[in-house]
Amino acid sequence: MIENRAQLMEALNYIGSKIENPVNAYLIGGAAMMWHNLKDATKDVDIVTSYEAANDIVSALRLHGKVEYKEGVAGVTFLRIMLPRKNLVVQIFIQSIYSTEDYQRLEAAECEVLTYGKLTYKIPDVKTLVALKDIQMHALYNEYQSLKESRSAG
């Protein structure tokens, strides 16, 4: 659990310090909301990046923790890396999970930029983060409706 901004910065630094090749990632979810002082704590660090960058990040972090492939909202597969030494969870979403329009929205967002080690984090503005969360909630609602309909049909 990351409980304050100092711990968030420490976590981002720890992750970046392990990376060997320069990579870029968008910081999203609770960590990005913490950065904007809209959330007090988060249980993980969520990032969106290219397949190649994800491969570099996983290659570096797998030596320090456990890697899992998980399925989330609307069947989205992502990587979860649990780093027990730091009690830290990193979730990596590959940019291809977003529609072209949604990823373009992310790329067009005004971002603050932080670099730790070889990892550059781009932190989208609040409006973009809320729009991305809205997309996730819409997908979750659709998943719920499908499940509800299949149960009533069966």
Image: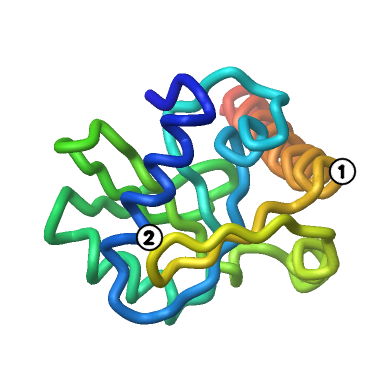
**Relative horizontal placement of residue 10, taking residue 133 as reference (left or right):** left
Secondary element at image label 1: helix
**Relative horizontal placement of residue 153, taking residue 75 as reference (left or right):** right
Using the image, tell me which numbered label, if any, was put on residue 16.
2
Residue 86, quarter of the rendered image: top left
Q: Is tag 2's residue or tag 1's residue first in the polypeptide sequence?
A: 2
Using the image, tell me which numbered label, if any, was put on residue 127.
1
Few, some or many C-alpha atoms within 10 Å of disc 1 (few <14, some 14-19, many ≥20)? few
Of the two numbered discs 2 and 1 in the rendering, the one whose residue sits closer to the viewer:
2
Q: Residue at x 40, y 72 (%)?
A: 118
Q: Which residue is drawn at 23% across and 67% down?
A: 60
CA gap between label 2 and label 1 equals 26 Å
Residue 67: % across, % down: 23, 53
Q: Residue at x 53, y 29 (%)?
A: 5
Secondary element at image label 2: helix
Residue 30: % across, % down: 58, 33
